[in-house]
Amino acid sequence: MVKKLESTLLNMALVLTGVAVVMGAILAFVNHLTEGPIAQQKEKALAAGIQSVLLCDNIVVAQTDTVRQTDAKGKELTFILYQAKDAQGRDLGAAVESTTGGFGGNLKVLVGFDPDGKILGYTLLEHAETPGLGAKADKWFQRGEKGDIIGKTPAEPLTVSKDGGQVDAITASTITSRAFLLAVNNAYNAYKATPAPDAATGATRSTQALPKGGVSE
């Protein structure tokens, strides 16, 4: 009886192991099939985002830079800058990817700056904020909205009115608003620290400290 029980348990273990192996192989195969289309979709979304934040449909990305800076707490931050020109070769400025920690998780913003550092537009690339509250950041700071930052130059960091600034925070979402503005301010500093497009591409810039600032309630 004991041997029969041991044999049954062994068979069950072998079956479960076999099922796990088969399922793992299926998942790996499905992931392989979908990773290409997902990557293409992300590329299309990024291209559309760059056009949107730079207010131009006919854009040439003349140079892509990876910029690394450290914040006041010594944490290294990484920014991706897409230096852009129009069809006539005129400098349009750059679209900058910037990430900070919001209320629910990372908040990744793409911000467009003209050659003088004025904000042309922005879009949220990723966020994990509460629907109906922090998620409103995709509209709240757009032109004509309550927290409108379009046309501003963050030479002096943008801050919410609760902190003495001139930007209205999202209702009941001060943490998200601070995180968003910090991402924009950091993007501006990364942009101003990066030379205009030249013959080099894919450059990696040296580490540089950012002004003090953080996210807190």
Image (cartoon, rainbow, N blue to C red):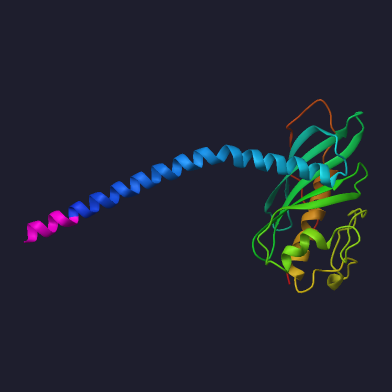
- Magenta span includes 97: no
Number of numbered callouts drawn: 0
Can residue 202 be seen by looking at this rendering? Answer: yes
Magenta residues, start to end: 1-9
Q: Is residue 62 left or right of residue 76?
A: right
Q: Residue furthest top?
A: 199
Which quadrant is the C terminus positioned in? bottom right
Q: In which quadrant of the rendered view does residue 178 lie?
A: bottom right
Residue at the image point whose x is 76% and y is 64% from the top: 136
Residue at the image point whose x is 78% and y is 39% from the top: 82
Choose between 48 and 211: the one closer to the eye.
48
Residue 2: x and y, percent?
8, 61
Where 196 sits versus 55, above or below? above
Where 60 sits versus 69, above or below? above
The main secondary structure of the magenta stretch is helix
Q: In which quadrant of the rendered view does residue 167 lie?
A: bottom right
Residue 216: x and y, percent?
73, 69
Residue 76: x and y, percent?
68, 50
Choose between 83 and 122: the one closer to the eye.
122
Can residue 206 be seen by looking at this rendering? Answer: no
